[in-house]
Amino acid sequence: MARCVARELVERSGVDAERLVDLLVERALGEIGNYYYYTLLRMHLVGVEGDLLRRVVDDAREEDRNHFEVLIPRIYELGGRLPATFTGELGPLGGLRNLPAEADVPEILPVLLRSAEESVRAYTHLCGITSGKDHRTYNIALAILHEEIAHQVWFLEFLGRGVAEQQIRHPRAISPFVTQFLQSQRVSAFQSHSFPA
Ligand code: ZN
């Protein structure tokens, strides 16, 4: 592998870079898997309850796509890469693959909640192993963690309160924590593509 300064710095600070990259790749695949299965799911959510859940799923779906986007540059900075082909389960929402035409909301909610809990656990772990050592990965993982906790709360609220109160849920802006990293990516892409030497 070519010499990779970011990776050397991370290793020097006491982080197992190989393990870190593996975890980041796993998360990136989990995020894009969520995006995929949320996309499938939203086509099967019908009726009043399904319609309300779809609004929550749509927000989570957009944020998980953003999580994928902000993880990728860090993986490559650390000398890692995404697998060229992928065979296997894309995250814990794979159980939603064979949905009936009308998805059963009470049956699906625990699956969504479990997946959100798994994400919260994974990003908490990533924060733990990078805290005080790899500031950049830590900041990205922490920003995603805030949003994963919000997803968990949304699904818990849906599970606990019933449909009536979902109608008064106040949506927030998409990716309030992760947007800063998306914006800095756009700026660096602009700089590298717009001003050729
Ligand atoms: Zn996510």
Image: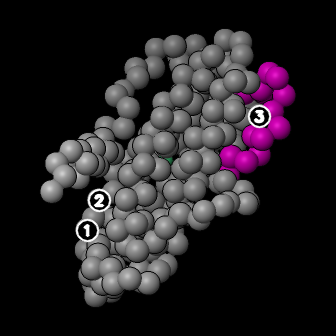
Image quarter in which the N terminus is found? bottom left
Find numbered disc 1 in the image and state the secondary structure of the residue it sits on.
helix
Q: Specify the amino acid type for callout 3.
A: Glu
Tell me what residue is drawn at x 38 percent, y 32 percent: 174
Do the residues bearing badges 1 and 3 touch, measured as CB atoms within 8 Å? no
Residue that mark 3 sits on: 107
C-alpha gap between disc 1 and disc 2: 6 Å
Q: Residue furthest front?
A: 197
> Which residue is depicted at the point 31% across and 37% down?
176
Which sits earlier in the primary sequence, circle 1 or circle 3? 3
Say if disc 2 is inside 8 Å of ligand 1.
Answer: no
Instruction: Give how far across and how far down residue 80 sits, in percent.
Output: 46, 71
- Region in magenta: 92-105
The circle drawn on residue 139 is 2
- Pointer 2 local density, CA inside 10 Å: few below 14, some 14–19, many at least 20: some
- Between the C-alphas of marks 3 and 2, the distance is 35 Å
